[in-house]
Amino acid sequence: MHARLLPLLIVLLAGVLLALGFPLAMSQAAAEQQRVVVDRIDDTARFAALAQFVASSPDEDERLAILRDELHRYHTLYGIDAGVFLRDGRALGVSPGGWRVPESGQGADAFAEALAGRRSHDPEQVWPWQDEHIAVASPVIRDGDVAAVVLTDSPTGQMRSRILQGWLPIVAGEAAAMLLAVGLALRLTGWVLRPVRTLDRAAHEIAVGEFKSRVAASGGPPELQRLAHSFNEMADNVENVLEQQRAFVADASHQLRNPLSALLLRIELLGLELPEGDEEFKSVQAEGNRLARVLDDLLALALAEHSPADLQLTDVAEVAAERVEAWRPVAEIKGVVLEWAGRKAVTGWADPVALSSALDAVVDNAIKFTPEGESVTVGVSRENSSVILEIADHGPGLTEEEMERIGDRFWRSNRHQNISGSGLGLSITRALLASGGAKLEYAHNDPKGLRVVITVPRTRPSADDDEGGDAGSRAVVSLIKRPKEPASREG
């Protein structure tokens, strides 16, 4: 918006300045030319007075000599062509010699007007880039009739130079005013758009899960201040609704766990009365255990979304290598090769407990869906300002449509419904990572399988100023499955 608003303001201000500057420059040029024209009119009037008595008696040598001498001195002194011509165009006196009445153009028009008894009209404006002359004519009246015409043809070099000199202060003033206008436009756009940028940043923070982000409605236009107040009210309501939702899920999960545990215990006791290997009993027991896992995952998700991260400068490679070693026995039982292909001592800003839990869920999924004899590779690398964790398996992978759904709550691939799981594991993982500024992404592995990419920032996220590590965030860890009881691939 700044790139659009600032040029618009500059163009408008430039238009205002030009609208003021052009008339001023034109007025200055017109005034300069008018001064020249008035001087020429005075000169032609003086020559007309001298020629008044010569026009009727061309043979009066003394008066004619005086007139010609005056015209010669005038031309020599000012460089202006001047002459007195009879009605038929014959010259009584001209300077320089041989100059005649022009056959066309401004001089011819001025001569014709003077013959009609009128002084020539003001000539068209001559601009500094036009190498034009100014012709002025006055009639010589004798006995009420036009006996001759005085015609002058003035070069305009000096006049145009004076116009340019007069324009220099105008141009300098326009330039200074334009610089001032640009400065004011910068300040104005900054004043107007600063609340907009603050709103945009707060909206982005809320979009990525920072629901406590608010806007200080202390600057900018009143309309934007009211918008900031409305935004804060909206954010408060959204946070309250989400808090109520989380509290409901957590409370419901917690309240259901006790009766469910009692129910599972009664099922166990009931199983003692049934024949060993009873299929109906095993089915009821499996469904009860699945319901218990769903409740645990719901509680873990509610706590993960609610708890702040305890960000620390963490050796991400060390945490990843530790989780690989922890999951290796599970992989060996499954017949899967779990490989470590990462660098050593790669640090980033993360909650080590949340990162460990997230790795457990992702590695668990990779092992669960990798066929016997295949491998799962965990790698760590450093890329610009991020630490990249990659967990690649050689399982069946996911289709393009499934790739768009992976990570959604309670979503599981139709091809893997026979594998136990609640469909919340990756949602919990994403919530754990997002609270610390990390990202979770998915891609196809080559030649087959799924590649999960965890991006951890190497610099502390500026938006995170909270004191981390409350009891709630640590409680999530107890609800994330550890290697002794691996979970299934979640959607």
Image: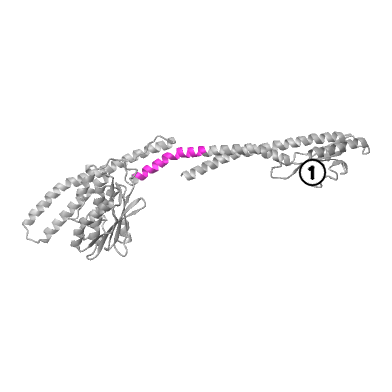
In the image, is 185 to the left or to the right of 442? right
Q: Residue 38 location, x and y as percent?
A: 76, 35
What's the magenta bit mostly, secondary-structure-wise? helix
Q: Quadrant of residue 322?
A: bottom left
Image point (70%, 40%), residue name: 161
> Could you tell me the amino acid type at mark 1?
Gly
What kind of element bears circle 1?
Answer: helix
Q: Is residue 221 visible?
A: yes
Q: Is residue 245 magenta?
A: no
- Please state, as top left, top right, bottom left or bottom right, where the C terminus lies in the image: bottom left
Q: Residue 145 location, x and y as percent?
A: 87, 36
In the image, is 50 to the left or to the right of 160? right
Q: Is residue 146 visible?
A: no
Q: Quadrant of residue 239?
A: top left
In the image, is 185 to the left or to the right of 149? left
Residue nearest the observer in this picture, 327 or 440: 327
Q: Residue 460 location, x and y as percent?
A: 33, 45
Image point (73%, 36%), residue name: 34
Magenta stretch in the rendered image: 183-205
Q: Is residue 18 above or below residue 321?
A: above
Q: Residue 350 location, x and y as percent?
A: 29, 48
Residue nearest the observer in this picture, 295 or 367: 367
Task: State the residue position of label 1.
Answer: 107
From this viewpoint, which residue is outermost toward the left?
A: 273
Q: Is residue 204 magenta?
A: yes
Q: Is residue 229 above or below residue 262?
A: above
